[in-house]
Image (cartoon, helix red, strand yellow):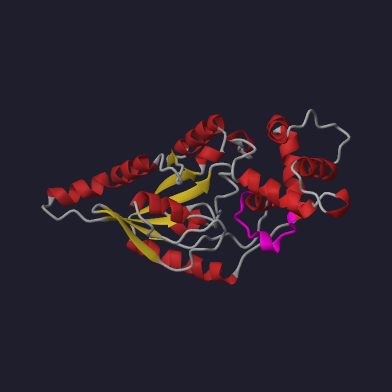
């Protein structure tokens, strides 16, 4: 399954972000904690350049805690501050505020020493579609300041949001990159909802997800869907059918509604109902 999705508005968004960088002090890059490398736009380093940066591993509650710790260490070794965040509940947000203050300390101290008024730190939020940028901003601001949605492509326009007297955030549209050189990255992005389901074969996507889960996380799969075992000779299609039957995805004639079963599986994975699962670990990239 070869996945590519690069809507025209993303070209414009990338260009605008490069322009807005001139106005900001810090870049806050949001990644999906379940797929930190696949959710990291390889063009961001070029776009951001030498700007001070904080990496937020968002949706950390949906990822494996032990692997979360490994990813924090991985990024810290790159001399980039990495913070685990659950934007829905707000955990980790105070650490983001502290980190932004720390990054700006030298500059603010210099201004203070010259008797100048302390400026508001401006931070730009960047990340792929559906990584939770708007939810992150709203929780940080304590109000519904940015548009949110459970689908990619909600944020389309520039939004400055005042978080505190010391910090102002610029929300930006989610951007992908023109071609996924690593087919696995495209697949993982689709699994987690960064690519619109409307342009995908949802049944094929669910089967691919199920294959990964059966290989890497069989116990979680068995626990969620009350499977005694997953026979070695059972095809992924048969496994999806079995799960669909157990969950009541039945149509006339007693057959399994495979589309409904596929949507159910994807929704439950994305919502963390199958378990706290991280699809990538630092060891995969060493």
Residue at 59%, 60% in the rendered image: 177
Residue at 68%, 35% in the rendered image: 224
Between residue 12 and residue 32, name the one nearer to us: 32
Q: Is residue 51 visible?
A: no
* Residue 153 painted magenta: no
Farthest residue, direction left: 115
Between residue 9 and residue 43, name the one nearer to us: 9
Q: Quadrant of the C terminus?
A: top right
Q: Is the residue 228 above or below the residue 239 in the image? A: above
- Percent x, y of residue 172: 45, 62
For the record, the magenta segment spans 192-202
* Residue 195 painted magenta: yes
Residue at 77%, 32% in the rendered image: 227
Left or right of 261? Residue 156 is left
Left or right of 275? Residue 157 is left
- Percent x, y of residue 126: 46, 56
Left or right of 110? Residue 121 is right
Left or right of 233? Residue 220 is left
- Percent x, y of residue 266: 67, 48
Residue at 23%, 54% in the rendered image: 165
Q: Is the residue 45 above or below the residue 33 in the image? A: below
Q: Quadrant of the N terminus?
A: bottom right
């Amino acid at each position: 399954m070869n996945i590519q999705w690069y809507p025209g508005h993303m070209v414009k968004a990338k260009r605008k972000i490069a322009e807005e960088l001139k106005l900001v002090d810090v870049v806050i890059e949001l990644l999906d904690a379940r797929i930190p490398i696949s959710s990291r736009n390889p063009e961001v380093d070029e776009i951001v350049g030498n700007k001070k940066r904080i990496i937020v591993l968002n949706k950390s509650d949906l990822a494996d805690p032990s692997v979360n710790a490994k990813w924090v260490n991985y990024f810290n070794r790159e001399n980039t501050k990495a913070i685990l965040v659950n934007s829905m509940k707000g955990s980790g947000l105070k650490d983001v505020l502290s980190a932004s203050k720390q990054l700006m300390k030298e500059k603010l101290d210099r201004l203070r020493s010259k008797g100048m008024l302390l400026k508001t730190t401006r931070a730009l939020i960047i990340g792929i579609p559906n990584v939770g940028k708007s939810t992150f901003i709203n929780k940080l601001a304590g109000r519904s300041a940015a548009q949110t949605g459970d689908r990619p492509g909600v944020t389309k326009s520039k939004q400055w949001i005042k978080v505190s007297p010391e910090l102002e955030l610029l929300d930006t549209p989610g951007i992908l990159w023109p071609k996924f050189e690593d087919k696995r990255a495209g697949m993982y992005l689709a699994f987690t909802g960064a690519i619109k389901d409307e342009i995908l074969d949802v049944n094929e996507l669910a089967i691919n997800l199920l294959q990964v889960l059966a290989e890497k996380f069989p116990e979680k799969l068995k626990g969620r869907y009350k499977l005694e075992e997953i026979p070695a000779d059972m095809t992924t299609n048969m496994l999806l059918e079995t799960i669909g039957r157990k969950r009541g995805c039945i149509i006339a004639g007693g057959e399994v509604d495979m589309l409904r079963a596929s949507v159910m599986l994807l929704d439950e994975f994305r919502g963390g109902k199958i378990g706290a699962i991280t699809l990538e670990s630092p060891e995969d990239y060493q």
